Image (cartoon, helix red, strand yellow):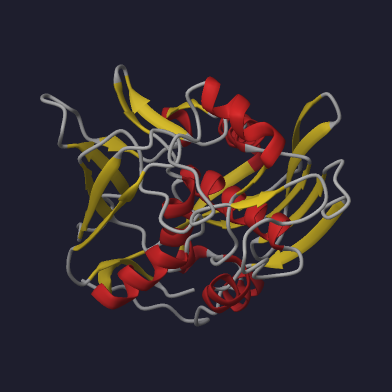
Amino acid sequence: MLLYQRTLAKKVKVTGIGLHSGMKVSLTVNPADSDTGICFRRIDVPGSPIISAEALKVIATENATTIGEGKFLINTVEHLLAVFYGLGINNAYCEIDGPEIPIMDGSGASFVFVLKEGGVANLSKLKNFIVILSPIRVESDDRWAEFHPSSKLIIDSTIVFVHPLIKQQREVFEFSCENFINDICRARTFAMLKDVDNLKRRGLAKGGSLDNAIVVDDYDVINPDGLRFKNEFVKHKILDTLGDISLLGYEIAGKVVTYKSGHYLNNLLCRKLLENPNCYDIVSASSLAPETKISFGLPQVIHQVS
């Protein structure tokens, strides 16, 4: 991790289909000043406010993470947010002319390519970090998610599906930009063929296709090119988790452990953490413990920049 806050060197634009809305949408990502954070605005809706990417702005979690204020919604933000986190981009102003972030190929790879092509710029202000001090847990039936103290960000994810190809998969991901790009960002969203019609009847997955999702029938993957990774399913869950916990607004020194979790529990975990200020601390990069600085690749001596 780099020491200073980051933004884009120049604005970039992508156009694609919304996974659930099926609508063609264009997204423009603009550079932003220090301490802006990640924020969005619907340019297709008159009077749309600027919506900050925060855990408390999440208003729906059914098959995607939706942020919004009142009637102004931005759906399926998790993949883009994961890529911002993965590239260390803390500040960006995103303009979108529809209700949903384009799904692209169902992973974060297209966003990584476009943002890296545009370039990433360092700003003059130090980053802040959220440091997990005490364990915290949320659960629903047999599903659960936890934060634990750690000098680095680690995501330990387990998924369980009654399907002969997936079954139970576990992946432990230690965050770095390099690890994110090589191991996680290309993992695509997935769906069961038997569930697709039901999703569409509920107004979801209108834009879904083999071009932007892994689809499995009763026995195997039906995409002609197969899987990108043997355990692509759990890797995609880690991508989703990273995007969801990035809504805390800071880079994270802590371990996330999830079992059969999803967007709802991920957001519930973030909300519970924020409700328990004794369980975390917000610190400047200059105030991190030495072992945490080492794990984030930060120098031991930090000089303030005027």
Vertical relation: 275 (above or below) 152? above
Residue 188 pos. (x, y %): 58, 57
Residue 175 pos. (x, y %): 62, 68
Depth check: give the residue in front, 9 or 208: 208
Q: Residue at x 25, y 70 (%)?
A: 124
Q: How many marks?
A: 0
Residue 61 pos. (x, y %): 54, 29
- To which quarter of the image does residue 226 belong? bottom right
**Residue 296 in view of the camera:** yes
In the rendered view, does 31 fall on the left or right side of 85?
left
Depth check: give the residue in front, 224 or 235: 224
In the rendered view, does 246 fall on the left or right side of 94?
right
Vertical relation: 79 (above or below) 76? below
* Name of the residue lying farthest toward the left: 46
**Residue 88 in view of the camera:** no
* Name of the residue lying farthest toward the top: 70
Placement of the C terminus among the 4 image quadrants: bottom left
Residue 230 pos. (x, y %): 76, 68
Vertical relation: 299 (above or below) 197? below
Vertical relation: 306 (above or below) 132? below
Q: Residue at x 83, y 24 (%)?
A: 141
Depth check: give the residue in front, 74 or 291: 74
In the rendered view, does 94 fall on the left or right side of 163?
left
- To which quarter of the image does residue 276 belong? top right
